[in-house]
Image: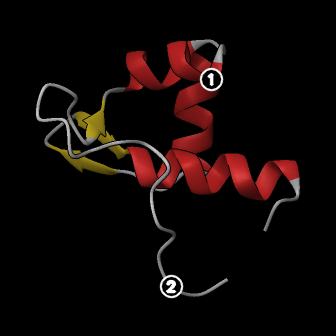
Amino acid sequence: MTGILKPYFSTDNEAEPALMTVNELAEYLGIGRNRAYELLNTGAIKGFRIGSIWKISKVAVEQFIYEQSGLI
């Protein structure tokens, strides 16, 4: 797939950050932190690190969900 998906998440709301942490990712997907780190380290979910802290965009999480559910 090429291009960037239009986000389903409402990032227009400034109270809701566009990035999430590993803990937030794990909670959102209902998985453990180790599994969240595995998804990031294998590239299944695209994220980036600032120092030792992972940051994951909600668009990347959304894309992962779409791909895994067969919607794209």
Residue with the most extreme bottom position: 2
- Determine crowd level at label 2: few under 14, some 14-19, many 20+ residues with C-alpha closer than 10 A: few
| Residue 36 x/y as whole percent | 56, 28
**Res. 63 mark:** none
**Residue at figure coordinates x 27%, y 44% from the top left:** 11
Q: Is residue 61 above or below residue 63?
A: above
2 or 1: tag closer to the N-terminus: 2
Q: Is residue 32 above or below residue 47?
A: above
Q: Nearer the viewer, residue 45 or 69?
A: 69
* Separation of marks 2 and 1 at Cα, in angstroms: 23 Å
Q: Nearer the viewer, residue 70 or 34?
A: 70
**Residue at figure coordinates x 72%, y 54% from the top left:** 66
Give, as a three-letter code, the residue at label 1: Leu
**Residue at figure coordinates x 25%, y 42% from the top left:** 18
Q: Secondary structure at mark 1?
A: helix
| Residue 21 x/y as whole percent | 32, 27
| Residue 5 x/y as whole percent | 51, 69
Q: Is residue 11 above or below residue 71?
A: above
- Determine crowd level at label 1: few under 14, some 14-19, many 20+ residues with C-alpha closer than 10 A: few
Viewport quadrant of the C terminus = bottom right
* Tag 1 residue: 29
| Residue 69 shown left or right of residue 23 in the figure | right
| Residue 34 shown left or right of residue 22 in the figure | right
* Tag 2 residue: 3
| Residue 23 shown left or right of residue 19 in the figure | right
**Residue at figure coordinates x 13%, y 41% from the top left:** 51
Q: Nearer the viewer, residue 43 or 65?
A: 65
Q: Secondary structure at mark 2?
A: loop
> Number of marks in the image?
2
Viewport quadrant of the N terminus = bottom right
